[in-house]
Image: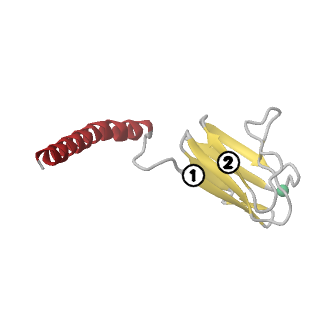
Amino acid sequence: MHGKWRLALTTLVLLAALALIGAVEFPPHRSASRSTNSGNSPAKIATVVIHGFKFEPATVTVHAGETVEWKNDGIVPHTVTANGERPAFDSGSINPGSTWRYVARTKGTYNYTCAYHPNMIGKLIVQ
Ligand SMILES: [Cu+2]
């Protein structure tokens, strides 16, 4: 009888100790992940839909470090290719129904087009 109670007490102390460790360990972990994000919301994604041979919206503005996602809602493949001899980004072929993501790390204004359809034009502004 006595041994049984001791076991129960030991278990209780152990559980309390574990709870204490948990309570001490969790808050620093949370604040660490909070400090890596400059804003108060988790990593943002701006979406551009490719539809009817157009980028919608044609101009998208993000903050440096944010992600832009292009979604091909069209019926033929498209690309997202920045202008210039050495494009800052180039998606390659994005098939219908597929998406392509780009992390906009460097501030600037990027005009881009579709390599297959040069009349499709868009602008990415990274602030
Ligand atoms: Cu295209």
SS label for mark 2: strand
Which numbered disc covers residue 116? none
In the picture, measured across the screen, residue 113 lies left or right of residue 6, that is: right
For disc 1, the neighbor class at 10 Å (few under 14, some 14 to 19, many from 20) is: some
Q: Residue at x 60, y 36 (%)?
A: 105
In the picture, measured across the screen, residue 83 lies left or right of residue 68, that is: right
SS label for mark 1: strand
Image coords of residue 73 (percent x, y): 75, 65
Which numbered disc covers residue 45? 1
Q: Residue at x 18, y 47 (%)?
A: 8
81 and 4: which is toward the camera: 4
Amino acid carrying label 2: it is Arg
Which numbered disc covers residue 101? 2
Q: Residue at x 72, y 52 (%)?
A: 122
The alpha-carbon separation of the residues under discs 2 and 1 comes to 9 Å
Find residue 127 and report its image quarter: top right
In the picture, measured across the screen, residue 39 lies left or right of residue 94, that is: left
Amino acid carrying label 1: it is Ile
In the picture, measured across the screen, residue 20 lies left or right of residue 56, that is: left
* Label 2 close to label 1 by CB (< 8 Å): yes
Task: Farthest residue to the top: give it.
Answer: 86
Task: Farthest residue to the front: give it.
Answer: 1
Image coords of residue 121 (percent x, y): 77, 53
For disc 2, the neighbor class at 10 Å (few under 14, some 14 to 19, many from 20) is: some
Dot 2 or dot 1: first in sequence order is 1
Q: Residue at x 59, y 36 (%)?
A: 107
